[in-house]
């Protein structure tokens, strides 16, 4: 039985990034859950960014991940929160929660999940999902793997159209999803992880969402230095004032206690 107790993450700098990337609707759980595949695991990730003077900014994020594996079944739960306040205005105060179950058949697995979240920057008051699918393990050797997943889920989203008069919009969809996960161990200390999430509304083929994230990390003793690139796009935002796409680049490092 392995148990990972605590992990601290301190971001160094964020460039051409904005809060919409953090509250982008599609959440990459691959990086959050990658350590939760032991018999028993628990991890806590904390991050913070402070600026004072001409630029007043406070940014923090945290993730708590728990996993339990028994025979071919894997139960996982993750709770995340992101907060961003800039020049006296709160830009993000986003909560994310997911329960996930996998049943393994060799290198493949069936999965089901339930997810709740909000994203203030997208004026997304509440979003919940319930879905399932099948993940194909197409290649696995040591730390290297390439997986491909097909699934479907039901989605319910509540948007704030006008905060002054509490005008809200409810959007409900059945969606099909295609995901890919690629992890490459370049050397003993260097690793590359790339994930892609594609979602298509069954009742409106023009309604498509895409989220890509690539992460390059360098491990040194108990430390890890990393660069993460994120790209979010939605072909038809449901309310006015929300851009179709956002990009972000994050430099950071983590320390394992």
Image (cartoon, grey):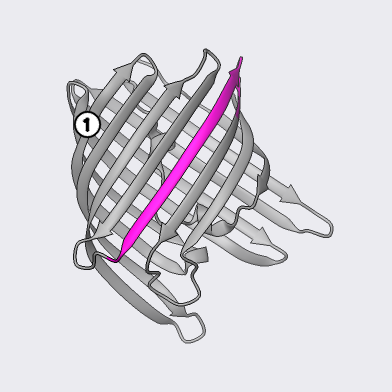
Name the residue at the front extreme.
Answer: 206
- The percent position of residue 163, horizontal first and vertical second, equals 50, 80
- The percent position of residue 238, horizontal first and vertical second, equals 38, 72
- The percent position of residue 115, horizontal first and vertical second, equals 31, 51
- Examine the residues drawn in magenta and state their main secondary structure: strand
The residue at the point 24 percent across, 27 percent down is: 137
Residue 257 shows in the view = no
Residue 77 counted in the magenta span: no
Q: Please rate how many residues cluster around mark 1, counting C-alpha atoms within 10 Å: few if below 14, some from 14 to 19, many from 20.
A: some
Residue 19 shows in the view = yes
168 to the left or right of 54? left
**For residue 42, what is the image quadrant?**
top left
Name the residue at the bottom extreme.
Answer: 165
Residue 219 counted in the magenta span: yes
| Image vertical order of residue 53 relative to residue 255, above or below | below
The residue at the point 39 percent across, 25 percent down is: 41
Name the residue at the right extreme.
Answer: 53
Q: Secondary structure at mark 1?
A: strand
- Image quadrant holding the N terminus, namely top left
59 to the left or right of 99? right
Name the foreground residue: 163 vs 178. Answer: 178
- The percent position of residue 209, horizontal first and vertical second, equals 36, 57
**For residue 79, what is the image quadrant?**
top left
| Image vertical order of residue 166 relative to residue 186, above or below | below
The residue at the point 50 percent across, 23 percent down is: 191
- Which residue carries the number 1 mark? 136
82 to the left or right of 151? right
**For residue 65, what is the image quadrant?**
top left
Q: Which residues are magenta?
A: 206-225
The residue at the point 59 percent across, 45 percent down is: 249
Name the foreground residue: 71 vs 34. Answer: 34
């Amino acid at each position: 039985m392995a148990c990972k107790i605590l992990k601290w993450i301190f971001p160094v700098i964020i460039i051409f990034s904005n809060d919409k990337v953090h509250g982008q609707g599609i959440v990459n759980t691959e990086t959050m859950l990658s350590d939760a595949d032991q018999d028993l695991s628990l991890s806590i990730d904390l991050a913070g960014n402070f600026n004072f003077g001409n630029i007043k900014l406070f940014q923090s994020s945290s993730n708590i991940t728990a996993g339990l594996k028994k025979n071919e079944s894997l139960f996982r739960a993750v709770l995340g929160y992101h907060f961003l306040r800039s020049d006296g205005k709160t830009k993000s105060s986003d909560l994310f929660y997911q329960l996930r179950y996998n049943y393994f058949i060799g290198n493949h697995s069936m999965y089901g999940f339930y997810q709740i979240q909000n994203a203030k920057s997208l004026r997304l008051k509440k979003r919940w999902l319930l879905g399932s699918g099948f993940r194909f393990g197409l290649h696995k050797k040591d730390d290297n793997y390439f997986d491909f997943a097909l699934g479907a889920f039901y989605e319910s989203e509540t948007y704030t159209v006008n905060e002054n008069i509490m005008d809200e919009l409810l959007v409900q969809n059945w969606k099909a999803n295609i995901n890919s996960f690629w992890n490459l161990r370049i050397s003993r200390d260097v690793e590359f992880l790339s994930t892609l999430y594609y979602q298509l509304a069954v009742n409106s083929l023009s309604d498509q969402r895409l989220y890509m994230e690539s992460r390059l990390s360098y491990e040194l003793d108990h430390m890890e230095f990393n660069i993460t690139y994120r790209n979010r796009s939605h072909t038809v935002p449901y309310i006015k004032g929300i851009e179709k796409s956002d990009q972000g680049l994050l430099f950071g490092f983590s320390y394992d206690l």
